[in-house]
Image: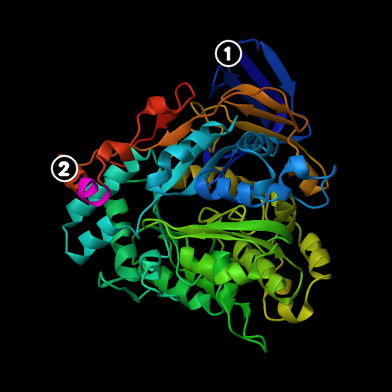
């Protein structure tokens, strides 16, 4: 089928298309305008902005933690809410199926679950397979497991560690690697309750810095497109900017991605010893071209924090709202679920302002990514309002007028005039994520790209415009019209498949039989275990 999207304002930074024009789709791909060709169907996009489908690189949408949050908070589920719901729902408020629909309505077509425990890979992929419309990917967690820590302690060769990373990524069907508070979960088992970059894991004699640098080198050597995805130490603590600054410096010219940097954007100024240090971190990121970051923006309201950072979640349990939580100490990847309500008080204002400062002070939109760390900073359904705050200083000022003036006095937000353009939005939410993840087939509107396209009807109300797409195409299928789902289809999971050396498989086989009394194949699964047809699309490594 040949489809024409006519007369829209095309915003495609990758291919330099910034202006009125037509877009053509043949079946699932974008094609050049055919000579004399007649479209089988035409959509009039006059008065609309046309972009590639949006990509979210960091959103907790599947796996054990998300499912446990639903079980912990049944009152947050849509089925238990009065109509209409009084507040935005957290991640516990909708099913996997509804997740895909909510994303698609906003024009998002690819989403990455950034924290998959290798032992829960099958569970995670089964949940992701139940999410319609959008394509999905995962990042496998390493950095607290006994096998890796033992190898680092015993001075295993870089090649052996690379083989282990390759085996983990391939066997779990992941698109990259994440490290969460490196070494802290292992230290937590020995009653350690605070852990910094140069602290050492008891029984292993390995520092957090050593773990991060080892994994960073392995990911780079394997040619995995997405750099090591780092959840730093000391999340949420006053003075956590020092930890983030040390981690940025530790990149040392090798690509490194820092997750939800807002949660490390805190200094210790003021009488409460809690202030924004976002301007300092933005300056460091601007000076380190090898570093990319996502924000983890805080927005006000009820949510639930879910994380495999068991040390952080354990320390946060006293702030649970409502007063219930789950903390579990898993084998290398524990974690916790702690519900939380962000209030427009002094502390909430500092967090809100710090995230916006990072967005606005980091100058290169190719290196800063649009996230709320769903649902930790806020559910992804607040994205339209966040777009408005980035694109309108007046909207920021209006919201700031109702917040803590003493908190805002310890940030630079009021002095920032920058407003994001549609081109910068397209870079940050389309072009840059595709490049970071190694997905050359999306994030742009050039010939040969998959036809993931979002069309927005221009409106002075930015939140309304970007929250309810006029048209969304997924692989050429029209799936959204005027903000409503018109057609359901199943997206794919995107994966890497780097081949590990056979020697590491033999060593892992022996290890699992000794440690668990189970053969290694119990920790892996065939593609046929996922219920959807053609569930995976393989992405090549670099080189």
Q: Residue 100: x and y, percent? A: 62, 35
Examine the image and state in which quarter residue 26 appears. Answer: top right
Element class at badge 2: helix
Q: Which mark is residue 453?
A: none
Boundaries of the magenta span? 511-516
Element class at badge 1: loop
Is residue 465 or residue 79 the one in the foreground?
Answer: 79
**Residue at horizontal 25 percent and vertical 69 percent from the top:** 204
Cα distance, mark 2 to mark 1? 58 Å
**Residue at horizontal 76 percent and vertical 38 percent from the top:** 468
Q: Residue 177: x and y, percent? A: 38, 50
Q: Residue 268: x and y, percent? A: 58, 84
Instruction: Write down the residue under mark 2.
Output: 506
Is residue 58 in sight in this rendering?
no
Main SS of the magenta part reads: helix
Task: Name the front one of labels 2 and 1.
Answer: 2
Q: Which mark is residue 35?
A: 1
In-image side of 331 versus 434 (left or right):
left
Q: Which numbered disc, 2 or 1, marks the residue that appears first in the sequence?
A: 1
In-image side of 83 versus 391 (left or right):
right
**Residue at horizontal 62 percent and vertical 55 percent from the top:** 372
Quarter that holds the N terminus = top right
Is residue 380 or residue 144 the one in the foreground?
Answer: 144
Is residue 318 or residue 464 the one in the foreground?
Answer: 318
Is residue 263 in sight in this rendering?
yes
Q: Is disc 2 in contact with disc 1, using a CB cutoff of under 8 Å? A: no
Q: How crowded is mark 2: few (under 14 residues within 10 Å), some or many (20 or more)?
A: few
């Amino acid at each position: 089928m040949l489809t024409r999207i006519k007369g829209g304002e095309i915003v495609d930074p990758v291919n330099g298309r910034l202006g009125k024009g037509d877009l053509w789709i043949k079946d699932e791909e974008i094609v050049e305008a055919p000579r004399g060709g007649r479209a089988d169907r035409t959509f009039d996009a006059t008065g609309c902005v046309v972009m590639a489908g949006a990509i979210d690189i960091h959103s907790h949408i599947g796996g054990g933690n998300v499912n446990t949050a639903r079980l912990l908070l049944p009152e947050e589920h849509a089925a238990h809410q009065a109509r209409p719901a009084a507040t935005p729902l957290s991640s516990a408020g909708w099913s996997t199926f509804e997740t895909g629909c909510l994303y698609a309505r906003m024009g998002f077509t690819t989403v990455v679950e950034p924290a998959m425990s290798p032992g829960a890979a099958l569970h995670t992929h089964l949940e992701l397979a139940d999410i319609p419309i959008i394509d999905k990917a995962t990042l496998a967690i390493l950095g607290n497991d006994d096998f890796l820590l033992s190898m680092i302690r015993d001075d295993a060769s870089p090649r052996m560690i690379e083989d282990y990373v390759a085996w983990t990524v391939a066997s779990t069907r992941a698109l990259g690697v994440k490290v969460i508070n490196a070494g802290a979960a292992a230290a937590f088992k020995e009653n350690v309750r605070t852990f910094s970059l140069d602290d050492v894991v008891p029984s292993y004699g390995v520092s957090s810095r050593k773990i991060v640098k080892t994994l960073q080198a392995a990911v780079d050597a394997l040619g995995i497109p997405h750099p090591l995805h780092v959840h730093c130490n000391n999340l949420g603590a006053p003075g956590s900017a020092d930890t983030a600054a040390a981690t940025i410096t530790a990149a040392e010219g090798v690509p490194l991605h820092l997750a939800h940097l807002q949660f490390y954007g805190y200094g210790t100024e003021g009488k409460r010893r809690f202030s924004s240090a976002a301007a300092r971190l933005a300056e460091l990121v601007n000076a380190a071209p090898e570093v990319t970051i996502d924000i983890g923006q805080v927005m006000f309201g009820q949510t639930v924090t879910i994380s495999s950072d068991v040390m952080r979640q354990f320390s946060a349990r006293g702030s649970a709202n409502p007063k219930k939580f789950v903390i579990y100490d898993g084998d290398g990847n524990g974690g916790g679920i702690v519900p939380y309500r962000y209030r427009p008080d002094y502390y909430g204002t500092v967090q809100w302002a710090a995230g916006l400062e990072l967005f606005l002070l980091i100058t290169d939109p190719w290196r800063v990514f649009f996230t709320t760390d769903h649902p930790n900073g806020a559910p992804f359904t607040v994205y339209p309002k966040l777009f408005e705050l980035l694109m309108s200083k007046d909207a920021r000022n209006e919201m700031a007028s109702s917040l803590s003036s003493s908190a805002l006095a310890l940030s630079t937000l009021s002095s920032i005039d920058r407003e994001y353009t549609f081109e910068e939005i397209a870079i940050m939410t389309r072009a840059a994520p595709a490049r970071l993840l190694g997905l050359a087939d999306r994030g742009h509107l050039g010939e040969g790209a998959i036809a993931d396209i979002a069309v927005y009807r221009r409106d002075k109300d930015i939140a309304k415009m970007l929250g309810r797409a006029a048209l969304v195409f997924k692989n050429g299928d029209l799936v959204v019209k005027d903000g409503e789902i018109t057609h359901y289809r199943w997206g794919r999971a995107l994966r890497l498949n780097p081949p590990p050396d056979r020697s590491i498989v033999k060593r892992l086989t022996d290890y699992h039989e000794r440690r668990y009394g189970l053969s290694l194949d119990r920790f892996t699964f065939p593609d046929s275990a996922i219920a959807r047809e053609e569930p995976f699309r393989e992405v090549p490594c670099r080189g």
